[in-house]
Structures are given as structure tokens and as C-alpha cells.
């Protein structure tokens, strides 16, 4: 009798366990997820914005063919496998790559995802009238063809040793042809409904979007993994600042995840001590840098000339002089900037390409040490002499700089320190900060975006997906200079056009040897830095925070931080 009771109890326990397992496997079982990106999202279409916050919000909905995981390894997303020469997916002559697509994917509206959507996404970005933000990812693409419903071939005009630019990483996902086919070219920016609520294949779908404020997502009931995502809804809030975002997770527990915690290290440590949350960090390719405008940004020029390249006929009145920008770089004590704002989450760098190690140049290491004496000597020898008020001038032009960045306590502190340093070499500096949602927004009508660059110097961080720098380094090509003709979405924000650089970019695109690719990429880095188109400051780690109750978070320094949000759970 006792044995029967024991068996009965065991069966009952097994039934409870099975019910528990079944409950755990239900989509949406963990209720609401609350994410805080203090730089509010402006659009959910990454093709129309270079802002990280826009690209990462979109990655909850839109997916690429492949992405990079937290180790920098390429993994399939919408693709069934990663093509290679060995498996026949990459042609032996490196002129094409053929992607097999997953057959089990449907859009959130229930319609099939097919190769036609991939072909359309390429045509959408390659439209010359559009001004596509990730256009450099499509360098040398001559055609994209659907071989069948689940196979796509991308053809290149030259041999591509690294053919994984198009549709790899969160900045160039697949969009639905049926939704966007009437939004191509110049119409792209006008399709508000599509840009704010794209239909996707990812774990979530957009229910409500308020630009520069909040996005409400819900679980995609057609997502291919039936037990994911664990959360039924996501509130993706924007606004505030990095300090308040950190506090909302680490101190008050109001949110589950806070992004980009660029705040003073001692403040962050005090918040972590509350025991409510944890900080996650990872070094990838992020560099806090000064962008040096090579064009004249004088407001008196009007919108037809202000900060426009105009085939080289509109140079900056003093920053186009290499002596000036070299002196500006030498006057900066980068270690002080690291100590003030970053601590262990920052390192001094003299390169725009700080990683992977094989691509890191040592040719610019002199910037590590501040040299006020040499900076002053360079300016003296170039004829920039102090006026009655101590500000240097030459031929009636004063070294007076408008220096802008996004609103953030660390960035404003960095601005103040650099202003003091530049004062020691006779440079006058006016500081300006702009709300991050506007500064990094994609509105072509706004005068305050980093892409418009209506200033002399601006500061922000940039990086690239994955571990190969080809597409990233192509961002400084002449063809990438922003202007009204590309809706201000070009990635060459400095507006520098350098024939040697373009030639190196073309060479990198067809070079197979990893050793040779590294040498070319380092030379490209040196052209940018030694001409002071960009003044690198700090190699930054990505730093975010999550509630201790939130599991599955794996910080990714090589792709979107939201790359595995489908795996997050309580």
C-alpha cells in the first residue's frame, strides 16, 4: 500500500514538473520588460539613421541574414548557414556570395519571408536618390538575385575577400517588400507609418511609437521559436541622461536594462552597491573622437553652402590647415579625460581603428603624451600668432572654435577640460550641447544633427559591427560626404576628400591576405589621423546595466546590445 502511495506521489510530482516546464515554455510568460535608452529613438528604420539608439531599437523587430555574437563570431539569423568558399556559398573567384535562407520564417503579419524581400532590401538601400545610411555595407555590389524563394545570390563587381558586408549586422537588416515597396528613393523619409512601425521577423513587433519618447513592443506571435520571447511586452523608453538611466536600474529598480552608461566611474560604483543590478561591459571598436570639419560652417553662407563640400571649393577657414588641427590634438591630455570620465572603462587611443589587435597602428602613439610646448611652436611657425586678447589669428581669421556634442555629464566635463587645454595654446572655444535624441536623429530638416555638422568640432563615439573593418573604413571615402543630395546620410562626417584614401579603400576591397588587409587598414587609419580629419580620444568599453532579476543578457561589443533579446528572461 505504501509503495502505491509513493508511486502515486512520484507520478503527481512528475505531472507538476511537466506542467511547470510547459508553463516556462510559454511565449510571453515573464510579462513586461522595461528598457531605458536615454538617447531617445527617432525612427525604427535603421536605413534612415546612423544613430546607435535607432539601430538597436530596430533590432528587436528587424533581422539581418547574419549577425555577430558576443565573441565577434558571425552566426546565422535569417540565413540557414554562413556561406564560405569551403561550403560552396562563396564563389571560388570571390565575385559572389549565395545565402541559403531559413524556410521556417514568416513576417509578424503572418506572410512568408522570401528571397524577394532580400532583393528588395538591397534595391531600397542602393537607390541613388535615397541617402541610405549603411550604404558602405553594399560596396561593390552589382546585383542581388533570388535563385528561388529561399536562396539569394549577391554579385560583386570585383573579387571580395570579405563578402559579408550586405545584410550582416544590425545596421542593414531585411525589410518587408510588401510594406516598403512604395517608399523607395526620395519617398523613403516620407513613409512615417512604415518607418515608425516596420513589420519584422524578430521576436517583437511595434505596437506604438512616439518619436523621441517611447516605443511599446509586444511579442511577435509568429516568431519562429515558439517558446520565445519570454516577455509579452517591452517598453523601450527614451530621454533623460546617462546618470538617471543608471539610477533607474541600479538604485530604484524602475527599469530592467539601461544602455550606454557614460557616467563618472565613482558614481556608477556607488549605484552598484545598492545590490539591485549589475553592470556589463565589453571592449570592441568604440572610440570617442573629435570630428574636425573640413568645410566652412559659417551661418552667413546659407543652407546652399554651409558645411557643404562643394567639390573642395568651400574649405574651412582654419581647420583645413593641418598645423592647426595637429596642435589641437597635441594640446589634449587624454589620460586626464580617461581618469575623469571613464576609469577602467576607457583607454587612451590615437587611432580610429583600435581593434582587433592585428589592425592597430602604432604610428600615431605620440598623441598619448600631451605636448603644449610643441603645439604652440607649430602654431607659431604656421603664422598663427596671439592677438591682443591672447587668441591666435592669421590674415584676420581667429582660432575661435564652436565645439558641440550631445548632452551628457561626462561629455560636458570632457568639453570643459579640452576647452581649458586649448586655451593654453591660444584657441578660443565656445561649447554647445544638444539633446542626444536630436543630435543623433535622422531628421534631414533639423539643423542640429551630427550629420548636418553646423559647428567646427563635434564629439561622439562610433564603432562598427563585427571584426572586419572594410565597410567601416569605407565611411571616409569621398562618395560618403553628407549633403542634401543624399539626405545628409553620408558617413564621411568630416567632409574630407582624399584621393590616396579612396585608392586604399579600393585596394582593401580586393585584398585577400589577412596580413595585407591589416597593413592597408592601418594605413587608412593613419591617413585619417595624421591629416586630423578625426582626433581620437578614448577607446571606450560598452557599458550598460541590467536588473539582477533579468537573465540571459550577454553584452555584445560587436553588434547590437539587443542581439539576443529573444533569450532574455526572468
Image (tube, helix red, strand yellow):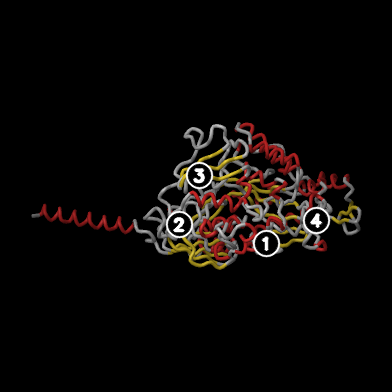
**Res 342 visible:** no
- Return the x and y of residue 139 as percentages of the image width and height: 63, 44
Residue 152 tag number: 3
Decide: few, some or many residues near mark 3? Use Cα within 10 Å; few <14, some 14-19, many ≥20. Answer: many
Q: Secondary structure at mark 2?
A: loop
Foreground tag (2 vs 1): 2
Foreground tag (2 vs 3): 3
Q: Secondary structure at mark 3?
A: strand
Residue visible at 75% across and 60% down in the picture:
454
Q: Against 323, is 510 above or below?
A: above
Foreground tag (1 vs 3): 3
Decide: few, some or many residues near mark 4? Use Cα within 10 Å; few <14, some 14-19, many ≥20. Answer: many
Q: Earlier in the sequence, mark 2 or mark 3?
A: 2
Question: How far is the residue under mark 2 from the one under mark 3?
Answer: 18 Å
For the residues labelled 1 and 3, say whether their Cβ atoms are less than 8 Å apart: no
Q: Secondary structure at mark 4?
A: loop
Give the residue at mark 2: 107
- Return the x and y of residue 31 as percentages of the image width and height: 40, 64
Give the residue at mark 4: 296
Give the residue at mark 1: 444
Figure quadrant of the N terminus: bottom left
Question: How far is the residue under mark 3 from the one under mark 4?
Answer: 44 Å
For the residues labelled 2 and 3, say whether their Cβ atoms are less than 8 Å apart: no
Left or right? Give the position of 196 relative to 230.
right
Amino acid at each position: 500500500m505504501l509503495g502505491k502511495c509513493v508511486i502515486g506521489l512520484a507520478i503527481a510530482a512528475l505531472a507538476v514538473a511537466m506542467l511547470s516546464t510547459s508553463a516556462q515554455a510559454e511565449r510571453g510568460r515573464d510579462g513586461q520588460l522595461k528598457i531605458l535608452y536615454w538617447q531617445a529613438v527617432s525612427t525604427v528604420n535603421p536605413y534612415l539613421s546612423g544613430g546607435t539608439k535607432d539601430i538597436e531599437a530596430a533590432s528587436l523587430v528587424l533581422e539581418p541574414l547574419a549577425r555577430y555574437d558576443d565573441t565577434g563570431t558571425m552566426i546565422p539569423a535569417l540565413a540557414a548557414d554562413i556561406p564560405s568558399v569551403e561550403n560552396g556559398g562563396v564563389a571560388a573567384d570571390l565575385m559572389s556570395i549565395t545565402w541559403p535562407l531559413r524556410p521556417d520564417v514568416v513576417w509578424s503579419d503572418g506572410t512568408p519571408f522570401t528571397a524577394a524581400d532580400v532583393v528588395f532590401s538591397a534595391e531600397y538601400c542602393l537607390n541613388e536618390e535615397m541617402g541610405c545610411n549603411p550604404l558602405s555595407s553594399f560596396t561593390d555590389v552589382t546585383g542581388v538575385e533570388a535563385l528561388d524563394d529561399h536562396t539569394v545570390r549577391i554579385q560583386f563587381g570585383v573579387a571580395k575577400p570579405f563578402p559579408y558586408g550586405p545584410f550582416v549586422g544590425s545596421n542593414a537588416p531585411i525589410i518587408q517588400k510588401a510594406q516598403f515597396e512604395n517608399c523607395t528613393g526620395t519617398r523613403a523619409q516620407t513613409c512615417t507609418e512604415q518607418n515608425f512601425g516596420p513589420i519584422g521577423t524578430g521576436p517583437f513587433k511595434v505596437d506604438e511609437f512616439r518619436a523621441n519618447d517611447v516605443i511599446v513592443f509586444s511579442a511577435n506571435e509568429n516568431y519562429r521559436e515558439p517558446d520565445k520571447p519570454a516577455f509579452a511586452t517591452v517598453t523601450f523608453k527614451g530621454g533623460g541622461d546617462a546618470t538617471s538611466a543608471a539610477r533607474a536600474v541600479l538604485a530604484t529598480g524602475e527599469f530592467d536594462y539601461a544602455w550606454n552608461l557614460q557616467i563618472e566611474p565613482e558614481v556608477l560604483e556607488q549605484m552598484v552597491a545598492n545590490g539591485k543590478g549589475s553592470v556589463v561591459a565589453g571592449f570592441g571598436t568604440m572610440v570617442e573622437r573629435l570630428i574636425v570639419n573640413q568645410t566652412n560652417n559659417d551661418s552667413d553662407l546659407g543652407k546652399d553652402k554651409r558645411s557643404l563640400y562643394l567639390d573642395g571649393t568651400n574649405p574651412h577657414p582654419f581647420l583645413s590647415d593641418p598645423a592647426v588641427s595637429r596642435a589641437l590634438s597635441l594640446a589634449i591630455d587624454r589620460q586626464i579625460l580617461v581618469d575623469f570620465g571613464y576609469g577602467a572603462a576607457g583607454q587612451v587611443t590615437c587611432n580610429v581603428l583600435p581593434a582587433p589587435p592585428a589592425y592597430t597602428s602604432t604610428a600615431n602613439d605620440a598623441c598619448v603624451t600631451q605636448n603644449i610646448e610643441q603645439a604652440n611652436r607649430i602654431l607659431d611657425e604656421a603664422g598663427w600668432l596671439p592677438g591682443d586678447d591672447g587668441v591666435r589669428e592669421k590674415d584676420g581669421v581667429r582660432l575661435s572654435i564652436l565645439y558641440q556634442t550631445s548632452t551628457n555629464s561626462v561629455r560636458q566635463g570632457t568639453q570643459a577640460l579640452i576647452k581649458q587645454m586649448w586655451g593654453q595654446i591660444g584657441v578660443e572655444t565656445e561649447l554647445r550641447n544638444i539633446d542626444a535624441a536630436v543630435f543623433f536623429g535622422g531628421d534631414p530638416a533639423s539643423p542640429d544633427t551630427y550629420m548636418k555638422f553646423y559647428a567646427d568640432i563635434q564629439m561622439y563615439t562610433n564603432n562598427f559591427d563585427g571584426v572586419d573593418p572594410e565597410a567601416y573604413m569605407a565611411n571616409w571615402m569621398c562618395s560618403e560626404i553628407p549633403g542634401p543630395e543624399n539626405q545628409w546620410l553620408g558617413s564621411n562626417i568630416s567632409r574630407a576628400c582624399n584621393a590616396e584614401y579612396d585608392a586604399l579603400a579600393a585596394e582593401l576591397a580586393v585584398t585577400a591576405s589577412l596580413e595585407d588587409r591589416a597593413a592597408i587598414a592601418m594605413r587608412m587609419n593613419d591617413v585619417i589621423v595624421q591629416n586630423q580629419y578625426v582626433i581620437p580620444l578614448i577607446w571606450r568599453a560598452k557599458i550598460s546595466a541590467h536588473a539582477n532579476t533579468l537573465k540571459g543578457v550577454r553584452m555584445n561589443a560587436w553588434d547590437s546590445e539587443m542581439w539576443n533579446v529573444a533569450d532574455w528572461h526572468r
